[in-house]
Amino acid sequence: MKDYYKILNVSKNATQEEIKASYRTLAKKYHPDLYINNPLADLAAEKLKEINEAYAVLSDQNKRENYDRGYSGNADNYQNKSSNNIGEQSFFEKFVSECEYLIENKNWYALHQKCNEAKSKYPKHYLPYVFEMQAYYTEGNLNAAIEAAKKSMMLNKKDFNVLLFIGKCYIDMKQYNEALSYSLEANQMCDGKNADILAQIALIYDLKGDKLTFNSYMDKLKKIEPNHEFINARKSVFKVGNNYVNKKDAAVDACLLCGLLECIFDCF
């Protein structure tokens, strides 16, 4: 039996106003829009489901009274059977909160320490690797980021967000075939309906110089999300070799070149 009071971060004597206020705060914190293309999306969704379940009971007076009677009667039995699971859940709730704070403050050294501590305590849990991969990526250690991402999927399940992340790492390393492999796998998991994945695949084909396939994926992207940021960004750059040059910068450079040539010819 779940402790709904603990899930909503309220006391057992909490008023309906306190329960509602806490619910709104937690629902906002774990809202799906905040976790788009985030490896923690599944975890947040599960947490929000639990929060909604707790609120549905505690916000209804009759359900709350029945729950309180049932909870009190089974408290000892619940404690004995589930203490290990509760300990792990509690540990990782605190772990996620602390890691989010460290990421916000860009304290990567402390984040690695926190992840090592979690791996030591729960070696078969995937979450420490999810946070590690983000830290490694920000530090520029792309190989380590990829290994951490792969490890997180080995311990949990294949996740299209993680596959997309690995693809992004390989793009940064200019290993476009590897990037394409992981990005296409992520695309298959989403039935070709995720705009960010389509954008990443289009980018890879563009970098590989495959104009035909690039245009094909751009067309698919435009159908799903015509105002996607990649479409808008692509309009503002020229592609020179495997590099992108901002059109405004290119225009300024062209003007400077014209001015320089004008100056040279005036001298003769």
Image (cartoon, helix red, strand yellow):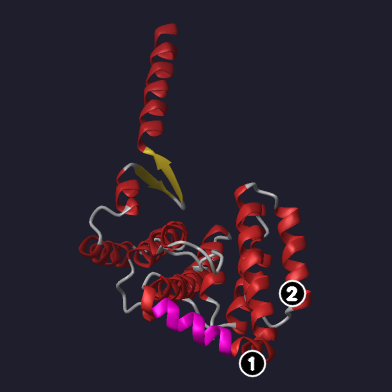
Outermost left residue: 223
Q: Position of residue 190 (x, y in %)?
A: 36, 77
Disc with the residue nearer the chain's start (1 vs 2): 1
Q: Which residues are magenta?
A: 63-73
| Helix, strand or loop under label 1 | helix
Task: Report the Cα–Cα distance between label 1 and label 2.
Answer: 29 Å
| Helix, strand or loop under label 2 | helix
Drawn side of residue 162 relative to residue 211, left or right: right
* Amino acid on which the number 2 mark rests in the picture: Lys
Q: What predominant SS class does the magenta segment belong to?
A: helix
Q: Which mark is residue 119?
A: 2
Q: Which mark is residue 38?
A: none
Drawn side of residue 268 relative to residue 96, left or right: left
Q: Nearer the viewer, residue 213 or 221?
A: 221
* Amino acid on which the number 1 mark rests in the picture: Asn
Inspect the magenta stretch and tell me whether residue 67 lies in it.
Answer: yes
Q: Position of residue 21 (x, y in %)?
A: 43, 56
Please give the residue where the numbered disc 1 appears in the rendered image. Answer: 77
Inspect the magenta stretch and tell me whether residue 137 lies in it.
Answer: no
